[in-house]
Image (cartoon, grey):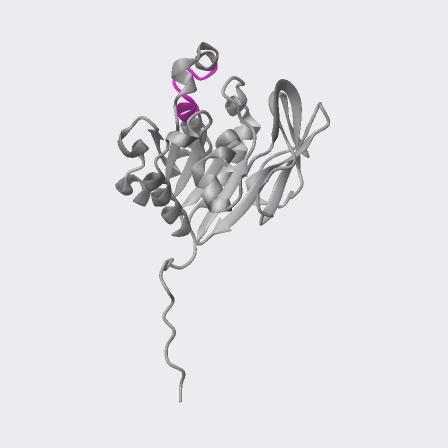
Amino acid sequence: MQVTVWNEFVHERSREDVRAVYPDGLHVVLAEAVAEQLGESVKVRTATLDQPEHGLTEELLEATDVLLWWGHAAHDQVEDAIIDRVRQRVLAGMGLIVLHSGHGAKIFQRLMGTGCMLRWREAGERERLWIVDPAHPIVDGLETPYLELPRAEMYGEFFDIPQPDELIFISWFEGGEVFRSGCTFRRGKGKIFYFRPGHETYPIYFDQNIRKVIGNAVRWALPTGVPYHSGAMHCPDKMQ
């Protein structure tokens, strides 16, 4: 399977506190997590905002089964033509995993058709991600009824997204807020997973349970089914 990890790669180069946690970039840690979870069955590439075509060339996307998306500070800098390209690939079957503040990314908003905004508070609070769909393959291999992060940025409802096809995690934070932290959607042939945990100054992507969820999500999001036709379907004449 072919996986691409996209990262805007802005904060890691401009802020020392971010560089201290992810010195080579979040995309490198996420790529390592995918390779660790899926082993020799996966080939992982990375792409970043500053590359030509943001690294998301037609050739790379055509060769990508699942795309992981990290965005935070530069959503508006992603060219609309590239977003259109990614969207078409999702509709054609490429899986998409949107992480943390990627809820504000153009690609997620375009696919959801809503603003995708939420309440937030950067307070380093404890978070529990309760598993509310224990039979789902994305939580396969987890051994507790919830995942706990000692320090996390709070995201709270209302989360302006369409009704998820499946709700897998609901988060609780020390301040009392709750949040739909693991949601799946289908658009065209593509499977989409939004996963809330992550922050540029917290080492959340080193957590083994979070890495397991991401690996499971990649497997779940792999393209399946029959070829996708974006144009009008041909209907044969009725038999006389």
Q: Quadrant of residue 140?
A: top right
Coordinates of residue 99 in the picture (x, y in percent): 50, 32
What residue do we see at 44% from left, 38% from top?
Answer: 106
- Looking at the image, residue 72 lies above or below residue 63: above
| Mark count | 0
- Looking at the image, residue 78 lies above or below residue 19: below
Q: Quadrant of residue 227?
A: bottom left
Q: Is residue 140 visible?
A: no
Q: Nearer the viewer, residue 87 or 39?
A: 87
Where are the magenta residues, as a range? 21-29
Coordinates of residue 178 in the picture (x, y in percent): 68, 33
Coordinates of residue 205 in the picture (x, y in percent): 51, 24
Q: Residue 177 vs residue 26: left or right?
A: right
What residue do we see at 28% from left, 42% from top?
Answer: 58
Q: Nearer the viewer, residue 149 or 143?
A: 149
Residue furthest to the bottom = 240
Q: Is residue 122 magenta?
A: no
What residue do we see at 51% from left, 35% from top?
Answer: 103
- Looking at the image, residue 4 lies above or below residue 20: below
Give the quadrant of the C terminus: bottom left
What residue do we see at 43% from left, 34% from top?
Answer: 69
Q: Nearer the viewer, residue 44 or 48?
A: 48
Q: Residue 147 vs residue 190: left or right?
A: right
Residue furthest to the right = 176
Coordinates of residue 156 in the picture (x, y in percent): 64, 31
Q: Is residue 27 magenta?
A: yes
Q: Is residue 130 visible?
A: yes
Give the quadrant of the N terminus: top left
Q: Residue 73 vs residue 195: left or right?
A: left
- Looking at the image, residue 6 lies above or below residue 188: above
Q: Residue 196 vs residue 127: left or right?
A: left
